[in-house]
Image (cartoon, coloured by chain):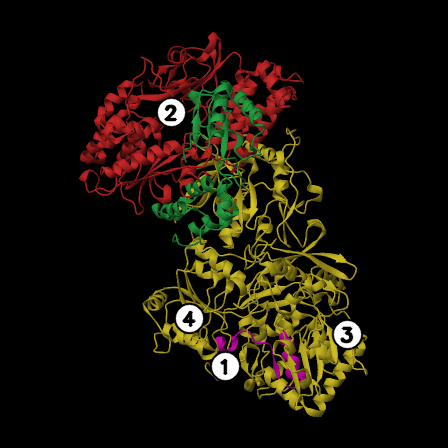
Chain colours: A red, B green, C yellow
Amino acid sequence: MPSLVSHPDEVKIISHRFGQGAAEIDRYIELDGYKATRAAVEKGPEWIINEMKASGLRGRGGAGFPTGLKWSFVPKQSDRPKYVLVNGDESEPGTCKDHVIFLHDPHAVIEGTIIAGLAIGSKMGFIYLRGEYRYLLKIMEKAVADAYAKGFLGKNIFGSGIDFDVITQTGAGAYEVGEESALMESLEGKRGVPRIKPPFPAVVGLYGGPTVINNAETIASVPHILLMGGEAYAKVGSERNGGTRLFGISGHVERPGVYELPMGYSLRKAIYEVGGGIRGGKKLKAVVPGGSSTPVLTADEIDVGLDFDQMGKAGTMLGSGGIVVLDESVCMVEFALRTIQFYQHESCGWCIPCREGTDWLKKSIGRLHAGGAVDKDIDNIRYLAENMLGRTFCPLGDAAAMPTIGFVKKFRKEFEDHLNGRGCPYKHAREREEALV
Amino acid sequence: MATEKKTIFSPELAAHFDKLVTLYPVRRSALVPMLLYAQDEVGYISPAVIAEVAERIGIRENDVASVLSYYSMLRTKPAGKYNIQVCTNISCMLRDGYGILEHCSRRLGIGHKEVTPDGVFSLEEVECIGACCWAPAIQVNYDFFDDLTPGKMDRIIDDYRAGRGKETV
Amino acid sequence: MADVTFTVDGKKLTAPAGTLLIDACKAAGIEIPAFCYYPGLSLQAACRMCLVRLEKVPKLQTACTTPVAEGMAVSTETDEIKQARKSMVELLLGNHPLDCPVCDKGGECELQDMTYKYGAGESKYVEIKQHREEQQWSPVVYFDRPRCILCYRCVRVCGEGMDVWALGVENRAVGSVIAPNGGDHLNCEECGMCIDICPVGALTSGTYRYKTRPWEMNHVATICTHCGDGCKTTLGVRIVTDGSEIIRGNNRDKSGINGDFLCIKGRYAFDFTTHAERITKPLMRQADGKLAPVSWEQALDFAGRRLKEVRDSRGGKAIGVIGSNRTTNEESYLLQKFARGVLGTNNIDHHRTADYAAFAAALKGHAGREASLRDFASAPAILLIGNDPTEQHPALAWQVRTNVRLNRSRLYVANHADIKLRRQAKAAVTVPQTGYAAFVQYLSGREGSFDGNDATAGFCDAIRNESSLLIVFGSELRGRDIQSLVQFGLSLPDTKFACLGDYSNSRGAADMGLLPDLLPGYVPVSAAAQFNEEYCASLPTQPGLDLVEMFDAAGRGDLAALYVVGSNPVARYGIDPSSLRNTFLIAQDMFLTETAALADVVFPAANLYEKAGTVTNTYGDLQLVKKAADKAGVRTDFELIVRLADKMGANPKTLVPFGKGVRADFGQTRGAQSGEADRHAVWLAANHLEPKLSPFDPFAIFDEIQRLVSAYNVPRLNLLTGNDEHIKSELVQIEPGSARRDLVFPSNDDLYTSGTLGKYSAKLRETVESGTTVMKPAESETAAD
């Protein structure tokens, strides 16, 4: 069971029920549970969307699209049923925030789903968890059953005359299904290959109906926003970046964990204060700030606020909030290799640049790491990644190309140190390779 | 499909599947979960599983094969009773995920996607399992174990071998 | 939709709103490369070759998924775009083997072309390529995985196009692979569409692989000889020691009425032409009762003399003639002209597979009501009564499926069987196998024996409410039933019809008068006088014996001679061989069929792939047949008829009036005095056309057909350039409803049989025996969804 951590700088909004037994519905109700939904039922869609817009909440999956705006795109009239889809296919390396939400506060996800449904006029919601999260599915299933038993789900919820059903399920192991349209494909029982856009899900989504799809953290934030008011929520964060988010700090820090910090919080402080600094007193070498797809920052680049805009300015992305901290002992080539190995494994294979590009990069970086490369191979790696960038069918290709370009650009010296038969200069890596041979 | 019909699954699972296909707006939506549950019971996706799932959903068998081969958790060969999945992705790698993998490999005498001769354990190097902040982490079937050391890993293996391990299904 | 104006590379273009940018550019002559995009199939955006720059859009966009919009500004050939395409090709070539020198596709490979145009001269890729062994999926389909670029065309054409769904994608990432439904083999219709549509050499043909290179063949676009759909097929031929041999059938030229489509027979079943049992020498029955090879002169002499003797001693009534469903219009026409004008008999018939005469009679006075095969691709509604097009008219089934898929056409099916096209049907009713006539009455709103219910009533109401309808029916309907159905159809606002018969020129055989009571154009023999002048003969005016009566007469000793051209009535009709013991039998065929085996003289004949002329498919689409193959020792039926007439003392110039009439001269006669004739002959021969100034010129007969059969008087230029011309004018001159004996005997060939030709196609037999043709239907999915 993942341990809970805490730090005084945290602003506990989403996480305020964590560790308090809120997975039990009665305890959840004691902790102001389902109040937000009740209010939403009473005040109606317009109020919900206005509050959401006021909150400045931006999608927590990584793209950072304003949630209220997204909901407002769903057509009011539709021949086909509308759906709410909760993306809990959390798979970006470095990211485990949804894990703790499902574990500690499943009803917040259900509430958010109902509220999103009320906002767009949907009668059915789906909560899709990654396949590995079976034990969390059990928790979600129980929470959903309890909510049905209380009349919060099903026919005539809260006596409103409105029906709303929730289906929970898991995937079966595929990072790509975290892409919204791939997730819909998967939910329709198909291969998780993304769809051509437009049409966007808000117009033609699941089963061809207008669909709102949000990250689990985004959805879990919704009831809290309605309870505290959109404006109050917005004030917690930085400019155009409302509220808080769950940051997962992992890697070489003293106190790794999932922390709820206000948007715009300093990355340096997140590492050195919240995370407790570099493990064993070592020196910081690099930070992958928002999940493995975000371009790396060097130790000199960490004086930046953790929000979508500031991170963008710093040449990287806030991403999924998974901060991976690397100390001086890490071989950046090996790290780049492990990163591209993941994307090579997870590419859906649909389009040429991603399918072939990730494989090519993995082979080339692997060869380079083992010492079998010459100078122009470094340029080739960068050439390849740059030619994938922006040209793939979906963002997975970018997710593979962006960090690769970052590693080569910012740590070219380390790549060069591997060339011409020299191989990896980092002892532990060399040992491991010998062991594997 | 009515439960009294011939099925390769247990009555409970067959009944669950009967219900599952009716939950969604289209039957096919039940495919991915159905395959996972079938694998949990049968151990892997056998040709017989493909055939019955295809019939239950009302699609072709090659459609099922196409879908199942997409998802990395679905396998067409049996694994051990306890499938140890060691994450070596970045967060785990930084905290010695590879060391855990090697330790398991040495301890069990098997490599990636291999099964111990007694069929009790299998080992798999997997991509990120969503336990980055508690790295290094593994899953034994569906159960997570985190903040591991080789010593902790040994105790987990011992527990499972002795039949004391967690078993979330 | 309304037109929009947009700019591509600075050029102002206009196209209907909603048109895909890639298509709009193509129409304007701007090529945007693509592997995965294929017109009519679902969009993929997978190959990323068609990336273009749209003004004000941050990323490059795929032209194959971008609809044109008003004011859109597009660049398609900037350095940025060239680099993007170059990198796509580089990425593909990373794993693609460079085995072009031995690859079947080399020379007509889209990846080769793209590499040539956009590719890099030097590969940056130094990693080890993924190699996989080639797999055989069926006798006709091979898969070379490393060559596959995953454009998914094959998957889509098999599923969306053919509604077979035998191909899928398995695994993911770089392990993604096209997989057949049988695990390691295919269970499908074996149409080979996947091979045709493959842009690279990943899918190769079992009949063609490793035999030659595309540029070493001659490519002859002609018409398939098998079913009545008359698909255009491109035959790849090369010179061999005894002529020229067909080594590939495909749809290289997609301009035909079949569009992209060819079935297994059109694509692979040309191998009967080189079957070892092919007769290549004339045979004559010897004193010992056995057939033995003789010289052409001997055989023709003997046959001509005997025919003349019979005619002169016993009159034309003692001679019978049976024609073919697979000879050209000119040959069928010539055969009946020979029978009536030279032999003096109306005892002429052929194996009838549909009641075209009744159909023509029913449409009397209603010109332009026959549907072309092309019409099925666009008709808003189609009613199919009887038949199983998937098996018997695969191109029709393709058109219908395409129409339902792309245009949401409404298909109504009335059939006794659970035919596959029901999957595309908006509504279907099951008719008892013997109840088609009653159903037509019921549909027409008349009381009758059809047992209707709410569903069938709704079905009929829906049809009656269609404002534009195609009615297509199989041989289940004949005679007066066709009359009733056509009458019903004509009561609706806008209806066209099609009558389905079995073979490549069954329709032509009927149109050309291979019937005992009807002359070409369905002119009753009683009105034969109008032909006398052209024929320079006095034609018999009493109806002759039909096919069955001829054998009855033979059995009675009343048929002294029988001339059978390209037909096997003995096997087809189960004729007792002893009934022919007193009949002098001449057979013209490729093989020693059951009929030919009984003959006194056997002439080795050429098939449709070895001759020129025209054929008419079952929908009345007239098409040009070009000579593709050649086989030493055989003669065309056309030549044989002329030679036989010559031996009988008839004037060949009368029989084949070459050089006569306005249309006879296509610039071919003008050279007669200047020595150009020879040059012309060389040119004609090189283009697989017959020299014009000979009694063996089918076009001389075609001229006459055009003079005498008004429906065939179509504009000729289009036809001669290899396109189809639909017969639009009123064909018939007989009165509708006249009582004619029903002799329709459908052959019920399926996708893998084709009468005699199917029997002698080793590839068809091998495919059926391999067991890869079995299909398992899944009911929940249709091409429509």
Residue C21: % across, % down = 47, 42
- Distance from label 4 to label 3 (Cα)? 49 Å
Residue C652 visible in image: no
Q: Residue furthest front?
A: B162
* Residue C630 in the figure: left or right of residue B113: right
Write down the chain letter for disc 2. A
For residue C282, the mark is 3
Q: Which residue carries the number 2 mark?
A: A97
Which mark lies nearer to you, 2 or 3? 2
Which mark lies nearer to you, 2 or 4? 2
> Answer yes or no: do the residues labelled 4 and 3 have beta carbons within 8 Å?
no
- Distance from label 2 to label 3 (Cα)? 88 Å
Q: Which residue carries the number 4 mark?
A: C431
Q: Nearer the viewer, residue B102 or A74?
A: B102
Q: Residue furthest bottom?
A: C313
Q: Which residue carries the number 1 mark?
A: C734
Residue C292: % across, % down = 80, 76
Helix, strand or loop for disc 2: helix
Work out whether mark 4 precedes mark 3 in sequence or the reverse, and give the earlier one: 3
Span shown in magenta:
C332-360
Q: Where is C674 relative to A257, above or below?
A: below
Mark 4 closeness class: few <14, some 14–19, many ≥20 residues within 10 Å: many
Helix, strand or loop for disc 1: loop
Helix, strand or loop for disc 4: loop
